[in-house]
Image (cartoon, rainbow, N blue to C red):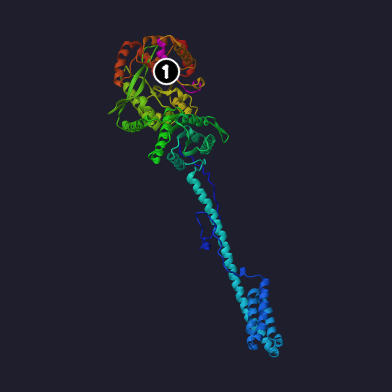
Amino acid sequence: MLAPNRRNSTVTLEPKVIDTDRCLGVSMQTQNHDVPAAPRVLTWASRPSTELMSVLVVATLALGWLLPAYVHEGIGHLHYWLLIPTLIAAGRFGLRGAIVTSLLSAVAAGPLSSILPGQPDSLGVKSWLAEFVFFLSVSAVVAVLVRYAKAADASVVALLSNQQQQASEVAEVHGELTRELERRVSEDDLTGLANRQTFTTKLQEMVGAGRCLAVLFIDLDDFKTVNDTLGHAVGDELLVAVAARLTTGSRADDVVARFGGDEFAILLADVSGKDAGRVAERFLGQLKAPFTLCGRTVSVRASGGIAVHDGGPVPSPEQRTVDLLRQADLAMYTSKGTRSRAITLFHDNMQSQMVARLALESDLHRALAEHEFSLQFQPIVDLRTGLAPSVEALLRWTHPTRGNVSPAEFIPVAEQTGMIVPLSLWVVREACAQLRQWDDQPETEGLAVAINISGRLVMEPGIGAALARELFHAGVAPNRIILEITESLLMEDRSETVATLCQMRALGMRLSVDDFGTGYSSLSRLNTLPIDEVKIDQSFVAQLQSDGPATTIVAATIAMAHGLGLRVTAEGVETERQLNKLTEMGCDEAQGYFFGRPVSAQGLSDYLVPKHAAEETSADDARAVVRSLPAPRQSAVNAESSGR
């Protein structure tokens, strides 16, 4: 599981720069993002039409000319009535309108006034010009003031229009930001799937509605390798491609989510417990086909866990939601722990198993610090000499309250938690220290030790250098260390695995394939990897007690290994009949209860003392063979052929 690789696939917004100082007083509704309406201002831009104003000017001019005569006003008051049209014209038409209207008003007050009934004769030229100057000066002042007012009004209109446009832009940007925020809150940035919060909310709603459902968790087992070897860009593309496949296989009511890293969750709506497993297997099957990413073909393996809800009312939908998520997660990690790469259905015992596993994990950390681990040794006997040139170191844990804890119980936990790395280095350190002590005794001088190493350890960066440091500090020749790897590790077609194995072999350590015959290793892998020997699994050796197909399989395995230049060790030899058959087949070495059970270092010394005394004449030669470096495969084959 990994953290993730995070490519920003969100929409990048580029809003225009907005002058906030000019937007004072402009409000924006944040709920529906409506653009505020422009304020209605009575401006000069909203004045009546030119035709209407022209009619109004003519009408007031005529009224100002006729009205004094009929209301018996004197000629002295006439100019006050004729001033009205000049002011209207000046305000509407500007300085030119003021001049024209002033001239007309002066004519109406001068020459034309004499034709009205009851009015005196026309004024003199000077009086007429004085009237004209009066009308023109007043109207001109008004025209100038109105012009400035219009200019100010145009500025106000432009400002309001600009504010309205900016408010519209702000509302648009706010709307996009709000939608983007809502998307980020509910969706995964990289894949576009629902995120954990949305998934949990939808699950809680379905649980509260009493619907039957199942929660499926899927985790990509090889995602870290893809990230480390091909880069994060390819890792991101892989996550997007996986999301697309899972979405394609889902139904309308299903919810596909990414919980983070390489972990996905699928909410299967309206499914029964019987159908949930079948549907989950179909989802997992969609990921088996290789992915084509950035011109590369990538294959991944996935593990899944599923928890089923039978529907009906529950006391607390919130708590039931939490329980379903925890159960599916627990089932998924059970699949990863067993390396089954399949779907595991949650059952009630998993909870107690998880509690026990957590307690065991805590005890593992404490046990290494408080020296609760120890080594036992089982002799590996050379079938040609009868001597034990090497022993296998077996890790034992004596718990203060539980007693002896089986390696089959704590080794998987150590691998899953990473404790296998310091634990394996401790085994190498203790085994090397014991070899140095044995060199002080003639019966154990020159022994080699076989150590089981985990596939998790081989994939640990820098493990080759760490092993080299341990051998250097212990002062032990590397050829006296035999590292036993599992057969399944041979199938790990990873460059870092092969590089680590080659590095170990280059240091001088020998490599052995443990439990050979129980996995699916390829013969080509045996021929290309730097392997020195194979160990036939005890399940085949046990069947040698009776003549059956296992006899043919063991014989063929020995012949094949010798043909590849590899030595062969048989595990689990318990009877003399099995030993005789293996000897007849040409097996090189054997170990098992027939020769001795695993014992402490002192117990092994006591076991080898009689052997040393009984084989005194050949012991020196045997130790010389043990102390020699591993010969090249071809030379080893030739030597064995000439010896037989």
Instruction: Say which of 620 and 609 sits in front.
Output: 609
Q: Position of residue 480 (x, y in %)?
A: 39, 22
Is residue 133 depicted above or below 252 in this figure? below
Name the secondary structure under disc 1. loop
Disc 1 target residue: 537
Q: Is residue 182 left or right of residue 482?
A: right
Instruction: Say which of 150 and 18 sits in front.
Output: 150
Q: Position of residue 640 (x, y in %)?
A: 45, 13
Residue 104, located in which quarter of the rendered image? bottom right
Report the quarter where the N terminus lies.
top left
- On the question of residue 201 being in view, the answer is yes
Residue at the (36%, 26%) spot, across then down: 409
User: Which amino acid, mark 1?
Assistant: Asp
Report the quarter where the C terminus lies.
top left
Specify whether residue 540 is painted magenta: yes
Count of marks overlaid on the render: 1
Specify whether residue 591 is painted magenta: no
Q: Which residues are magenta?
A: 526-545
Q: Position of residue 65 (x, y in %)?
A: 67, 83
Is residue 190 depicted above or below 415 in this figure? below
Q: Residue furthest front?
A: 70
Q: Position of residue 34 (x, y in %)?
A: 54, 56
- On the question of residue 263 being in view, the answer is no
- Mark 1 closeness class: few <14, some 14–19, many ≥20 residues within 10 Å: some
Residue at the (51%, 57%) spot, across then down: 29
Residue at the (68%, 85%) spot, across then down: 109
Instruction: Say which of 382 and 352 sits in front.
Output: 352
